[in-house]
Amino acid sequence: MSGLSYETVATFAQQGGTLYFAAIFAAGVIYALLPRHKEAFKRLAQLPLEKDESDNV
């Protein structure tokens, strides 16, 4: 065999997956905290509170 046991591959996959998802999470947080997106997020936060024309039906 090539010297790779199940435990070695499983450990690598677990650590690699953790690092991958941590990087994706960090990218999402950075994207959300960028100042240029502030107005868009404020507008989207108020969207559920706006009165819709379909509410009168």
Image: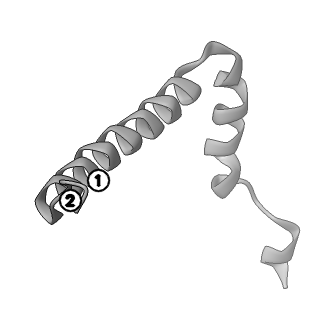
Q: Where residue 5 appears, x then y in whole percent?
A: 15, 61
Q: Determine whether, in the image, residue 32 is placed left or right of residue 5.
A: right
Residue at the (23%, 56%) spot, across then down: 9
State which quadrant residue 25 falls in: top left
Q: CA distance from mark 2 to mark 1?
A: 5 Å
State which quadrant residue 6 falls in: bottom left
Residue at the (29%, 45%) spot, across then down: 18
What mark, if any, has residue 10 been given in the picture? Answer: 2
Q: Residue furthest left?
A: 7
10 Å neighbourhood of mark 1: few (<14), some, or many (≥20)? few
Quadrant containing the N terminus in the rendered view? bottom left
Please say if the residues under marks 2 and 1 sit with CB atoms less than 8 Å apart. yes
Residue at the (59%, 18%) spot, across then down: 34
What mark, if any, has residue 13 been given in the picture? Answer: 1
Looking at this view, is 33 or 14 the one in front? 14
Residue at the (47%, 39%) spot, across then down: 24
Q: Residue furthest bottom?
A: 57
Looking at this view, is 29 or 41 the one in front? 29
Q: Determine whether, in the image, residue 52 is placed left or right of residue 7.
A: right
The correct choice, above or below, for 14 with respect to 34 in the image is below
Q: Amino acid at mark 1?
A: Ala
- Disc 2, SS: helix
Q: Amino acid at mark 2?
A: Ala
